[in-house]
Image: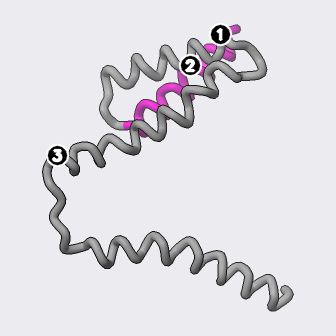
């Protein structure tokens, strides 16, 4: 392998590692207020919804497939609080729906 490519991979790794590590090291002993902690705990769910929800309406095969998938995901989310369970359950349910229709 060309050494230039290896150095490029190392540089890209450092470029993504350093911005993630600096706040962890600097803010490690900082105690955030409870209100801010509660807000930050909901950020992953908001980002996940913002990334997935537009895909429901811009699906290329059939819009109803996206609507059914969103309905199944909302149903799973109302019963389970774990995001992984919701995503895996929705994928499995849509696999079953696509097999029969």
Q: State which mark lies toward you, 1 or 3.
A: 3
Q: Secondary structure at mark 2?
A: helix
User: Which comes sooner in the sequence, label 3 or label 2?
Assistant: 3
Q: Position of residue 48 (x, y in %)?
A: 48, 38
Q: Secondary structure at mark 1?
A: helix
Magenta region? 83-101
Classify residue 6 by image quadrant: bottom right
85 inside magenta stretch: yes
| Residue at point 60%, 27% (across, down) | 54
Crowding near the residue tagged with mark 1, few <14, some 14–19, many ≥20 C-alpha atoms within 10 Å: few
The crowding category of the residue bearing disc 3, from other C-alpha atoms within 10 Å (few below 14, some 14 to 19, many at least 20), is few
Q: Which residue is mark 1?
A: 64
The numbered mark, 1 or 3, whose residue comes first in the sequence reads 3
Q: Quadrant of the N terminus?
A: bottom right
Relative to 75, residue 25 above or below: below
Q: Position of residue 21 (x, y in %)?
A: 42, 75
The quarter of the image holding the C terminus is: top right
- The residues bearing labels 3 and 2 have C-alpha atoms spaced at a distance of 33 Å
Q: Residue at x 18, y 59 (%)?
A: 32
Please name the colour scheme applied to the rendered image.
one colour
As measured in the structure, the alpha-carbon distance from the residue carrying label 1 to the one carrying label 3 is: 39 Å
Q: Is residue 77 left or right of residue 66?
A: left
Label 2, residues with CA under 10 Å away: few <14, some 14-19, many ≥20 = some
Q: Relative to the observer, which residue lies in front, 38 or 99?
A: 38
**Do labels 1 and 2 touch, CB within 8 Å?**
no
Question: Looking at the rendered structure, which numbered label has been put on residue 69?
Answer: 2
* Magenta run includes residue 61: no
């Amino acid at each position: 392998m060309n050494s230039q490519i290896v150095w490029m991979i190392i540089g890209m790794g450092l470029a993504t590692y350093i911005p993630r590590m600096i706040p962890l090291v600097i803010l490690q002993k900082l105690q955030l207020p409870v209100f801010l902690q509660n807000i930050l705990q909901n950020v992953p769910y908001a980002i996940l919804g913002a990334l997935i929800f537009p895909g429901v309406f811009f699906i290329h095969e059939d819009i109803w497939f996206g609507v059914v998938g969103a309905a199944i995901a909302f149903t799973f989310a109302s019963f389970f609080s774990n995001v992984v369970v919701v995503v895996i359950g929705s994928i499995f349910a849509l696999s079953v729906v696509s097999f029969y229709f």
